[in-house]
Image (cartoon, helix red, strand yellow):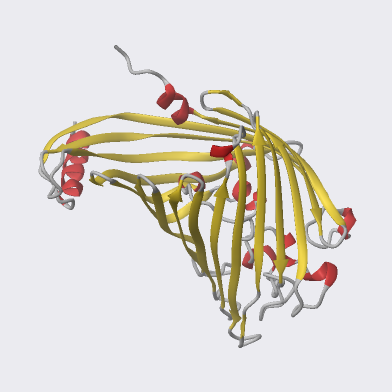
């Protein structure tokens, strides 16, 4: 009883921070679970494993959560309409099994999750969601190029530790977040990333957007040195599907601009940039996507060593290593071409259950590697949302 009283008091206090008058609070037990399987056979010998090593990823993840949900209503909030706020406090776990690894059950626990979230309508045309704590990266719904986050990162680092704010309007959406990935310590660098994205629908067939992040890679107790890595990507998307009998026929034009500085070892700023063109054709859940990047190496410090003699590599660069482009064709200050072809089938098997079967081919002047992918994803929250309300 004391726990429920204290929880109700906290919810009332949180609601007082919003410009509204509280009239009721409905509190109930809440739960969720997600599950995913990924098979990814990567064969990159065509590039001499220059960008990423050949390997096979075959793993299964389950993410159960339990907690409390409270819905608070208001009479007036200064905007002249009635609304409600949804509060959630959740605790869960991230369990991952790499098939054939021989890992013990205790080693499969990747990370505990715990977060508070608030969903609130700010006006008749604007709603917001705030999530704070350790929570799934899937709560970020914005578009980011693979130059920002690779497939491997999304699977093996599935959580954000920090804060995420999202704002939705009828024809636009925006997000701002911070992911604190490392607290300074022995053998552990201070690392955090601030990221933002947004998009707006100008016409039924035209969207304008941007994405950006600032990655701060700093000292540990043993190693001094700070690297700042900023990446900005404005883009323009044309989708001609409304005019043809296709699910999608899109052309996306983007510009990638990086600003990097290794303060101790290099000192000066490095500013590699390039253009990205994405073409996608989709019909009957079958898709062809071609991603073409022409520009300079976006990861010029990838093979460099820090003051402790450790390679920066994927610790500093979170994107797909193929955006390095330089090792295959040109010197660091020369532009080069990277092209990727993805063929995939993504049927929606049932509410909450999604399947993806894909083949990928990478080209850096010549064929440099590819992969075959089978991915399965189950989302209980999506399943429950699709069910009709009880009579």
Of 58 and 164, which appears nearest the observer? 164
Residue 93: % across, % down: 49, 40
Q: Residue furthest top?
A: 391
Residue 197: % across, % down: 46, 58
Compared to residue 386, the image places residue 258 above or below, namely: below
Of 255 and 176, which appears nearest the observer? 255
Residue 82: % across, % down: 16, 38
- In the image: residue 156, left or right of residue 44: left
Q: Quadrant of residue 120?
A: top left
Q: Residue furthest front?
A: 243
Report the number of numbered marks.
0
Determine the residue positioned at 45% across, 39% down.
92
Of 103 and 89, which appears nearest the observer? 89
Determine the residue positioned at 65% across, 66% down.
275
- In the image: residue 66, left or right of residue 100: left
Of 158 and 105, which appears nearest the observer? 158
Compared to residue 84, the image places residue 236 above or below, namely: below
Compared to residue 236, the image places residue 219 above or below, namely: below
* Residue 237 in view of the camera: yes
* Residue 42 in view of the camera: no
Residue 269: % across, % down: 60, 84
- The N terminus lies in quadrant: top left
- The C terminus lies in quadrant: top left
Q: Quadrant of residue 285?
A: top right
């Amino acid at each position: 009883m004391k726990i429920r009283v204290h929880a109700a008091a906290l919810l009332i206090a949180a609601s007082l921070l919003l410009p509204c008058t509280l009239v009721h609070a409905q509190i109930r037990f809440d739960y969720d679970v997600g599950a995913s399987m990924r098979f990814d056979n990567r064969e990159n010998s065509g590039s001499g494993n220059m960008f990423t090593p050949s390997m096979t990823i075959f793993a299964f993840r389950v993410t159960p959560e339990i907690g409390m949900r409270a819905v608070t209503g208001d009479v007036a909030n200064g905007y002249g309409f009635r609304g409600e706020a949804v509060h959630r406090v959740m605790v869960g776990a991230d369990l991952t099994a790499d098939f054939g690894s021989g890992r013990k059950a205790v080693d499969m626990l990747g990370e505990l999750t715990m977060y508070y979230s608030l969903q609130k309508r700010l006006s008749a045309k604007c709603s917001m969601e705030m999530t704070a704590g350790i929570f799934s990266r899937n709560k970020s719904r914005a578009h980011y190029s693979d130059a920002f986050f690779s497939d491997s990162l999304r699977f093996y680092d599935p959580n954000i530790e920090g804060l995420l704010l999202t704002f939705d309007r009828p024809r636009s959406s925006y997000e701002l977040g911070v992911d604190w990935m490392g607290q300074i310590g022995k053998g552990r660098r201070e690392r955090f990333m601030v990221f933002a994205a947004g998009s707006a629908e100008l016409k039924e067939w035209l969207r304008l957007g941007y994405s950006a992040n600032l990655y701060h890679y700093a000292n540990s107790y043993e190693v001094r040195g700070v690297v700042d890595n900023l990446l900005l990507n404005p883009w323009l998307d044309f989708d001609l599907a409304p005019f043809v009998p296709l699910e999608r026929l899109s052309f996306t034009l983007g510009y990638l601009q990086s600003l990097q500085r290794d303060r101790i070892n290099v000192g000066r700023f490095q500013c590699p940039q390039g253009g990205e063109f994405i073409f996608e054709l989709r019909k009957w859940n079958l898709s062809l996507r071609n991603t073409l990047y022409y520009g300079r190496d976006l990861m010029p410090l990838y093979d460099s060593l820090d003051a402790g003699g450790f390679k920066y590599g994927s610790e500093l660069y979170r994107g797909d290593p193929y955006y390095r482009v330089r090792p295959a064709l040109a010197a660091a200050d020369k532009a080069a071409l990277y092209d990727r072809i993805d063929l995939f089938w993504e049927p929606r098997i049932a509410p909450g259950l999604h399947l993806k079967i894909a083949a990928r081919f990478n080209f850096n002047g010549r064929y440099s590697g590819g992969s075959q992918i089978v991915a399965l994803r189950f989302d209980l929250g999506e399943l429950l949302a699709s069910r009709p309300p009880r009579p």
